[in-house]
Image: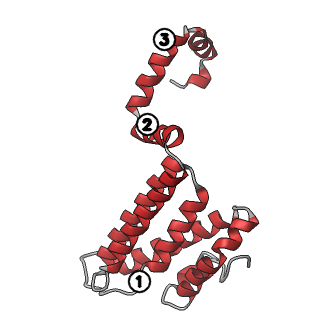
Amino acid sequence: MKLSEHKDLKDAIMALPEKEKDKLLLRLVAKDKILTEHLHFKLLETEIDLEARKELIKDEIEKIVGNIEHVSYRDALYYLRQLTTSINHFFKITKDVYAEAELKVLLLNSMPISFNSPHYRGKDFGFQFAVYFVKSADAVVKKVQKLHEDLQFDLADDVNKMLKKIYDSHLTKGAEYIQLPTELGS
């Protein structure tokens, strides 16, 4: 049942006494972990806490990517997805588009793109890694292009470094196929 489909219910909820609405609101918030964490961030945390959250993810990226030299594409794909999930969770909580883009660019710039390739039955993890990496880069570029010009300027060097890394590697064909730009602004 959607609230938008039942105007009478919405009106009845709005007519409830303030104390009862507050109780219902607290019960609803308690059921949603993301909403609870978002409200905690929005209402109780400061700019310093935002920076601390960013640094925590940067440290996580550095720790995982720093120890990733001799792994397979399968493991690299796992780590890339794991770190992307951490960044997505950060965004759900903070709603900071610039920080999300900055962290994803950092991740893609830090992540090596060539790994050992043992064969697994029926799965080409090298191909899956390449597709995931290029699509992630495309999503980041689109997100950066939607930012204000000043913020785009701040990220331009790192984004262009990421794009150059892709076009100077075996990922070129995939990047060309999805029409990933060769540099920001082109």
Q: Earlier in the sequence, mark 3 or mark 2?
A: 3
Quarter occupied by residue 173: bottom right
Left or right: 21 in relation to 124: right
Closest to the camera, between mark 1 and mark 2, is 2
The image shows a total of numbered marks equal to 3
Q: Earlier in the sequence, mark 1 or mark 3?
A: 3
Report the amino acid beneath label 2: Thr
Question: SS class of the residue under badge 2?
Answer: helix
Q: Identify the disc placed on residue 36.
A: 2
Left or right: 111 in relation to 119: right
Q: Which residue is mark 3?
A: 20
Q: Label 3 to label 2, Cα distance in Å?
A: 19 Å
Q: Which residue is mark 1?
A: 112
Graded by Cα atoms within 10 Å as few (under 14), some (14 to 19) or many (20 or more), the crowding at tag 1 reads some
Question: SS class of the residue under badge 3?
Answer: helix
Q: Nearer the viewer, residue 19 or 132?
A: 19
Report the amino acid beneath label 3: Glu
Q: Earlier in the sequence, mark 1 or mark 2?
A: 2
Graded by Cα atoms within 10 Å as few (under 14), some (14 to 19) or many (20 or more), the crowding at tag 3 reads few
Query: Relative to 43, does residue 166 appear above or below in the rendering?
Result: below
On the question of residue 142 being in view, the answer is yes
Query: Relative to 144, does residue 170 appear above or below in the rendering?
Result: below
Left or right: 8 in relation to 150: left
Tell me where residue 43 appears, x and y as whole percent: 52, 37
Report the amino acid beneath label 1: Pro
